[in-house]
């Protein structure tokens, strides 16, 4: 699948969830025609129809429902994993190396460094 494949799958999930190109396009911040074209291209690449379209409704086909049920928990897990990374945003990380004499370490640096080490081993 090409680079835009993930976006196409996310857009498919939005349409399948909303059961409307218009509502999904509004939520995604794109035009209905762009969204429709993207889904048609996805269906062409996969070689299977994912959505049944009528003038009044959109519904997943059997293949579309299967794909939808498979994708939703995976995307939810990815979102949860990304949200958990926020904990690392403001936390210092990495290794600090200090070259100094034993006397400077014991008298100056170690007394200042010791309280910090409990929070940042």
Image: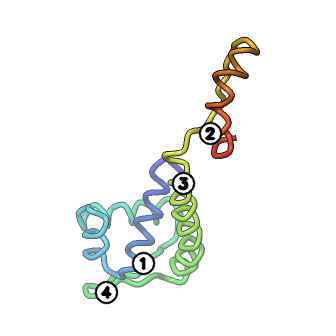
Front residue of 49/77: it is 77
N-terminal of the pair, mark 3 or mark 1, is 1
Q: Determine the CA span between mark 4 and mark 2.
A: 60 Å
Position above or below: 101 against 24: above
N-terminal of the pair, mark 2 or mark 1, is 1
Report helix, strand or loop for mark 2.
helix
- Residue under pointer 3: 87
Closer to the camera: disc 4 or disc 1?
A: 1
Front residue of 30/104: it is 104
Residue 116, disc: 2
Front residue of 24/118: it is 118
* Left or right, 52 with reference to 86: left
Residue 57, disc: 4
- Assess disc 3: are there few (<14), some (14-19) or many (≥20) residues with their C-alpha within 10 Å of its C-alpha: few
Closer to the camera: disc 3 or disc 1?
A: 3
- Assess disc 2: are there few (<14), some (14-19) or many (≥20) residues with their C-alpha within 10 Å of its C-alpha: few
Closer to the camera: disc 2 or disc 3?
A: 2
- Residue under pointer 1: 16
């Amino acid at each position: 699948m090409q680079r835009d494949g993930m976006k196409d799958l996310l857009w498919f999930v939005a349409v399948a969830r909303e059961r409307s190109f218009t509502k999904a396009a509004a939520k995604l911040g794109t035009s209905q025609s762009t969204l429709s074209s993207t889904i048609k291209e996805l269906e062409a690449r996969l070689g299977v129809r994912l959505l049944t379209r009528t003038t009044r409704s959109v519904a997943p086909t059997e293949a579309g429902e299967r794909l939808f049920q498979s994708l939703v928990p995976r995307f939810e897990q990815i979102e949860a994993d990304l949200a958990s990374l926020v904990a690392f945003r403001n936390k210092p990380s990495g290794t600090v190396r200090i070259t100094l004499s034993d006397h400077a370490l014991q008298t100056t640096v170690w007394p200042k460094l010791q309280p910090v080490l409990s929070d940042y081993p």
